[in-house]
Structure formats: structure tokens, C-alpha cells
Image (spheres, coloured by chain):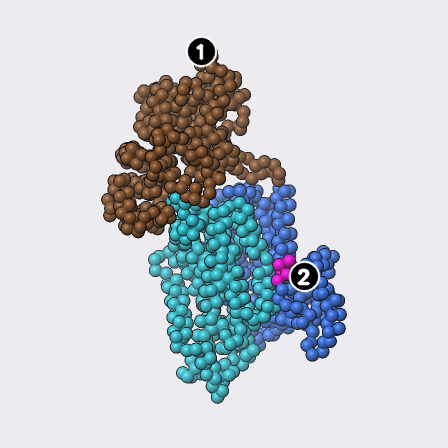
Amino acid sequence: MTWHESNLGAVRAYEPLRRLWARQSVRWRATRFAPLSALALAWLILLLISALLDSLLSSPDAISMDLRARLRPPLLFGGNWAHILGTDDLGQDILARLLLSVRTSLLVALVGSGLGALLGTTLGFIAAHFRGWIEESVQMLVDLQAAMPFTIIALALLAFFGNSFGLFLVIMGIYGWERYARLARSLALSALGQGYTLAVRSYGAGFLRLYGRHVLPNVAGPLIVNMILNFSEVILLESALSFLGLGVQPPLSSLGTMVGYGRTYVTTAWWIAVIPGVVIVLTVLSLSILGDRMQDRLNPANRSCR
Amino acid sequence: MLALVLRKLFRAALTVWLTVSFVFIVLRLSGDPAQIILPINLVTPEVEAALRHKWGLDQPLIVQYLDYVANVFRGDFGFSFRDGRPAVSLVLASLPNTLALMVVAVPLTICTGIAIGVLAALRRGRLTDRAIMLTAVTAFSVPNFFLGILTIIVFAVSLHWLPTGGTGSIRHVVLPVLCLSAAWIGIFARFTRGATIDVLGQPFVTGLRGRGIPQMAIIRAHILPNGMIPTLTVFGMYIGSLISGSIIVESLFAWPGVGHLLVESVFSRDLAVVQAIILLASLMMVTANLLVDLSYGWLDPRIRDLEIASRVL
Amino acid sequence: MTGDPPNRLLLAAEQVTRIYRVGARALPFTSPPHVSAVQNVTLMLHAGERLGIVGESGSGKSTLGRLLMGFDQPTHGRVLYCGRDIREFSRTERFGFHRAVQMVFQDTHGALNPRLRIFDQVIEPLDVHRLGTRQQRRNRVHDLLSKVGLPAAIAERYPAELSGGQRQRVVIARALALAPKILICDEPTSAADVSVQAQIVNLLDDLAQSERLTLVLVSHSLAVVRHLCTRVAVMHSGCIVEEAPAEVLFHEPLHPYTRALLGASPALARRRRRSTPVQSCTAISSPSGIGCAYASACPDVAELCRSAAPNLIELVPAHHVACHKVTTGRRSEKRIEEDHAGIGA
Ligand SMILES: Nc1ncnc2c1ncn2[C@@H]1O[C@H](COP(=O)(O)OP(=O)(O)O)[C@@H](O)[C@H]1O
Ligand SMILES: [Mg+2]
């Protein structure tokens, strides 16, 4: 139950919004079968499969320009079957670009949240294990990270250091680490109070064995929920930065880049911006709903009437 | 209590200082400002040296840093590389525009969010509740740049009801405010709903109902004040996030505020202005959090104790 | 495993105190409220011995056990293993210490990792210490399981699929994997029901003999301690108030707290009915420093008890007690010298 450190309504300031948000989890459906969650899951699976298939079938520069078919609207809005989702001003098929962008966005989100999970969980475990000044300094870093205007600083860093995909990934990873750290620390502290971790320590097992083999598998649930939430946040941040032209750079393209590109054409070809935008919304929404559901599953006793 | 306030003040100041120092050092490491701002073909070495000297760029980094900190305390944030005006005056000139948006957006967000949240809690489990909560989650999932583009397409391009951007009339305010508020209305609604459900479940509310006191009176006198405490944290985050939120909205709607200035300065690598804006945003976040922290203790002494306990255990 | 000569001093606590902070400081730079979970305890453990530590809940037994295991560091004093401070161990020495001193935990505290098969948990100490080949380790696991009376098939199961008694046996098997010299058991039976308790006690009894273990048995059950132990220390509010060979302590308890405890123990109540009920008196409730911690509940409290804390004094050879009343009574009879400072000297 330590996942909810303080259920008394006494939430600390600085506590990350997403975790608070998750704590308010809404029960979408009391029964086993939850149509909304099923839809959400279906959407994510579809996205994943299409990104995987696409990376098998095509290469980034394979999108042909068809200058005779520029700015064609999507199928249901006067277009034809040749370009189901329409084309952009260079006559590139929106669907083909979309698949490429989904691939990039998912990759960035995966690497970003993975990096954050690795860094944060490790630091959280280290803080719980060593206590003392090490714990204090980790907590100070966590508080600092939570209290600084990270988006703005990320913006400045990306602009000043120029377009480097590596730096971008690192920033995405740093974005969420402090929630993992906070969570991992409190989970590890509760696990360390249990006999099995004492036993493992009593025969002299090292840090890696203790935390990798014993603590982590036992506290993975909340960390995974956090990862789902963080994943959607990274998608949002990535697309916002890319929208401004500071994130994913050409020749790569992400969902945010596409929306930013389409911004110029809002008066003439709305679909260029709207289609990738809808994909972002559906993805983040699906992740939110699934996160809620998992949260509910993890803690059946927790405010089950919600 | 005084010790608590002092400690929190100290931590807040420390946070701002660390943020500012971190940004200063990292941004200086990104490259030589003189190289960036001078047009390459026109520069003679003498001009460059003169400029370096003028901006103190010929000093070692640590000296520059100490100078910078000392100047910040005097209210001097350096000069914009772009037009040579003091960074402070640039920021101060655009601040009123940002504040104008916020003056509309903040009350709107809070009132709407709380009202919807209470409504959902009262209709808990029913269709109204589900619809409100689904809308809230959706609103939270729409990135504001996309909401901006959608509203421009619908209300400006197709319907011609509102302008696509710029300033001048009250009609120019509508879309930016909507984009700033939508996600946070969703967040406030969700939190208020949770808090209200908590209060509704408490025995004293049932007692009041049993005595036939009208619903609205109970809501006004008991549910709102008690339910507000958890929502306070969200409020702190909301205020803290206003500047980052305004970045995209202002640049999308060509609204000449701080966010707009930030994007322009960032692209032209206008170091002094960027640093000043980061300091401003950091101050706002920290102050908001500090106020929230302190008002917790003021609203509910129990939480003060709990806070102490949670720090120790 | 080298055969230690009997009576060799293995593990010793020297005037060990462990103070926990239990709240925030009221103001900066003032001292925060604290509790002495263990207060100035001196204790010797000789090879082949079976030491029982009894006392009510909250008297500091588990803390003492943790200190002896090196899980927790004393605030004052030190813990010695074979004459060396365990905090000053080198890496290899610490590894040796881990092999020699093992602990059996109460099952209710989740002593087994719910996510690993029994086999993986019992073999892990052998893996950590790289003892033998893979095949030898496997065989050793099956040996250990049969030693504690479990069928080999259990190795493939998860803890949740076992009964409480079986889990406790697994915990014992895991603790024995490294062939330790000393086994510290913290309330090994308190989670089990009565019939299982008896089985576990008998198992520990047998194992202590066959494996030549030195036992430390932490328990609030006097019956268990009486059955298993050769020497007993009684703890109250973090202090040892009486320590004696088991037979002596149970037949001739000196400290009023021990007497109350014996009277309150259901299994032993038949023999002694006259005593007062035990009043709960944990470390927190006693104001630190002044007087005997048991004074507020003691039936024969005297003036001196409220003003000065009694020292643990060896009244009769091997029988130590910390009580003004008892010592002054005996002293007038036997004229024992004033400055018997305690058993540690
Ligand atoms: N980690 C700790 N932090 C603070 N107080 C503790 C801690 N561990 C034990 N205590 C306190 O020390 C006293 C002794 O506890 P313990 O050794 O568990 O007693 P026992 O095992 O005899 O029941 C108790 O008052 C307990 O509250
Ligand atoms: Mg105990």
C-alpha cells in the first residue's frame, strides 16, 4: 500500500501531477469487460503493428513525391483510393508519412521513458539502500528536478546545442526520472522491511542481486503503471518540441513534426495537421485509460467505489 | 511553524539559485555567444574583441558567472544580443500581454473545473459522471498545439467567427484562452471530483442531509471548503506551469507575450533574455509551490504534523 | 567447518545501545525525541550454547537480534565476533561472518520472496558464496529440504503454495545452507499454530544437535525457551534485567519482572500463581535515564528504584540480575561488595 504514501489528502506540493492524477483513478467500468480499455488496447496494438510492419516494408526515403497529386484531401473528403489520407504539398502520401512518424514517435517515447525508468529506478533504489547523505542528495535532486521549469530549459538546451537526436533522447529520459526515483525509493523501503530482503542481505548478496532479483520483481507493478503514464507524457513533450521545430529534425519526422509542418496549410489543407494530431490524441488517451485500469487492478481495495 | 516557513523559504531560494546556475553554465557550454550573433562576413577581429570585452565574454567562465549572479541581484539581467536593449525591459514589456491572457484563463479554468468536478461527484457513477470524466481525460490528452490548430481550422478558417491570431480585441483572446485552459479544466474537474467524493462519504455530510439541509447549502458550506485542500496542490502546479503553457499558445496565435518572446529568443540564441525568462518561470513555480505548501499548514494543522512525520519516517 | 572447542566465545555484545529517533525535532538544533530500543546490553554467546532472549513485545529483542546480525549499527558499544568488531570487518571477513551467522525470520514478515521458487531461494546463498559445483549445490538443496523434513517436490513450488509450517521449514533450510555456526531465530514459532509450533521447536532442537549449532532464540514464549535453551536473558525496556542458566531462572527467578512474566505465561502458570500480572511498559513510556524502568509496575518498588537505575550484577555465579531490592537483600545477607559493575568487566 506504500504506493499511496499519503492517502489523507495531504499531498505534498512538488508531487508530480501525473502521479496525483493516477491516484484519482477513475473506474471506467466496474465489470470485468471494459469496452473502453479494450478499445484503447486495440488502438495501441494497431499502432505498434503498423509501425513494426512499416519499418519492415519501407525505408525512410522511400516516400515518393507525386507532384501531380499535391494537396489531395483524404478519401471521405473528396479524395480517392490512391491516397486514403490525402497528400501534402509535395504530393507525398500522408499515410506513408504518418507510419514513419508513428515509428519515430514511439521509438523516442520508448527510449525516453526507458532511460528515465532506468535512471530513476536505480537512483531510487540507491537512495533507499544507502540512506544517509546519499539519500538526502538524491532527494534534493528529485525536488530540484520537480521544481524547475523543465520544458523551458529543455527548449533552451535544444536550441542552443543545435539539433542533436542524442541530446533530444537524453532530455526525454531526464524528463521523468524523478517520479521513478521517488516511487522506487518508497517501494524499496517497504520491500527492505520485509524478511526476504533481510535474508538475502544476511548471506551477503550484492546490490544487483538484491534489487534486480528480489526487490524489482516484487515492486514492478506500480513502476509499470508509472511507465505507462510517463510514456504518454514523453509523447506529448516530444510532439510539442518537434512542433516548435526543436525536437525531431528532418529527414526524420515525428507526429509533432507533421503537425508543425501542417500548421502552414491550415487554410488550404487541414488534413496535413489534423490527421497526425488525432493520432497523438488517441494514443495519449488510450495510454491514460489503460493506466487507470492497471492502477485499479493493482489496488482493488483502493477507493474501489470511484 | 516559523522554523518550517524559514526552511521552506530557504529551500525555495536554493532551488531558484541552482536552476539559474545550471542554466547559465550549460548554456555557456553550448557555444561561444560572440560567434553566434555576429554576422560572419562583416566581422573584423577588432570588432569581435571589442564586443567580447563589452559583454565580458573575454573573462573566464567562473568570473562571468559571479558577475552574472551579482548583476541579477541588482536587477540587471544583461542585454539582449539581438537589439541591445536590457533583457529585463524586453521581458517586462511582454509580461502584461501574458498576464492579460492569464487573468482570463485562470479564473475560468478554476471555476469551470471545480463546478464540473462537483457535478460529476454528485452524479457519481451515472452517465453524466462518465461523460464528464471522459471529456476531462480527453482534454488532458489533447496537446495544446493541436487544440490550437483545431480551433483555428474550425472557428477561424471555416466559420470565420474569430481571428487566427494577433491582438487587438476581445475576440483575439478567446482561442488562446481556450487552448491554455482546456487541459487544466480537465485536471481540476478530476481532482475536485475525487475530493468531493471523499467529503460526501464522511458521516457528517450524511448527518446534514438527514437533517434536511438543502443540497446547495451543504455543498457551499462544507463540501467545497473541505474538498479544496487536495485541489490546492493542483493549483500550485497550474500557476507554476502557466509560462511553459503559454510558449506554444502564444507562438501559435502570434500573441506578443513572454512565451512568444522565449521562442524568438531561443531561436536567435539570445542568451540574456532566455536566462531572464527561465528565472522568471522558476520564481513563479517556486513561489506557487511555497504558497500552496504554507496554506496547507494554515488550512489544516493536521497536515502540518503529517508533513513533519512523513519527513522523519 | 572447524570444530570449535565448546565454550569458546563466539559472539559478544559489549555495552550496546541502539537509539532510534521517533519524531521531528521541535526546533532546529534541538535534540529530536528518541527511544533506546536497546540500552547498555552486554551479552556473551559461547560455542554450543543455546541462549534464549525473552521479554514482552517492544522490549527490544528484535533490535538486539538485528544488532548481533550486523543489520543495524549500535549507537554506542560494539558487537564482537571471534574478538573482532563486526563493523571493522574487511570484505572477506564479512563474507565469512555471513557464512557463520544466519538468521531465521518470522514467516509473517514475508521471509520468503513470493516471486521465486523454493529451490531458487534455498540455493541462492550457495550461489552467492560460490560453494561447490552446480550439481553439488542442487544436491545440497535437496539434502537441506529433507533435513528439515520437507519432500523434494516442494522445491519447484512457490511460497504461496506452501502451508505456514512448511514455509517456516524452508526458511530454516535456507538459513542452514551455508552451514552456519550460529543460528539466530527471531520468534520462529509465533506465526504458527500450536501443533506446528511444537514441530518447529523439535526440529530446531534436533538440528541444533545434528548440525552442532549455537542457538540464539528470541521469543516471548517462555515455554519454547524453556524447552530449547540452556541460558536465558530477560529483557525489559531495552535492558537485560536478569540472566541465568535456564533451570535456575525458571526455578528461582529473582527479578520481580521475571517473576511476573513467569506468572503470566500460560504454560507455566500452573506452577506459579502468586505473582502480579505483567504490565506493559515499553521503552517509550519510561522517562530516559532516571530510575529503574520497571519501577512503575513493580510490586516491591522502593525509594531507590525511582532515583537510580540498577546495574546488572552477578549475584550467584552465572546468575545476573538488575534489581536494587534483590541485590540489597542479598548483600546484607552475603556482604557482596558494592562495586560489582556487571558481567562485562
Ligand atoms: N527502526 C526503528 N525506528 C524507530 N523505532 C524502532 C525501530 N525499531 C524498533 N523501534 C522501537 O524499539 C523498541 C523495541 O522494538 P523491537 O526490538 O522490535 O521489540 P521486540 O522485538 O521485543 O518486540 C520499540 O519501542 C520500537 O518501537
Ligand atoms: Mg520482535
Q: Residues within 10 Å of mark 1 (few under 14, many from 20)?
A: few
The residue under label 2 is B61
Three-letter code for the amino acid on which mark 1 is drawn: Glu
The colour applied to the residues of chain B in this rendering is: blue
A101 over C111 or under it: above or below: below
- Direction from residue A250 to residue C116 in the image, left or right: left
Q: Residue at x 43, y 25 (%)?
A: C279
Query: Are circles 2 and 1 on residues that touch, CB within 8 Å?
Result: no
The residue under label 1 is C333
Q: Output the letter for the chain in cyan.
A: A
**Which mark, residue B295?**
none
Q: Residue at x 49, y 59 (%)?
A: A116
Q: Residue at x 37, y 26 (%)?
A: C231
Residue B83 image position (x, y, % from top left): 72, 71
The furthest residue to the bottom? A68
Q: Nearer the viewer, residue C174 or B279?
A: C174
- Direction from residue C89 to residue B269 in the image, left or right: right
Q: Residue at x 39, y 23 (%)?
A: C244
The colour applied to the residues of chain C in this rendering is: brown
Residue C114 image position (x, y, % from top left): 35, 48
* Label 1 chain ID: C
* Label 2 chain ID: B
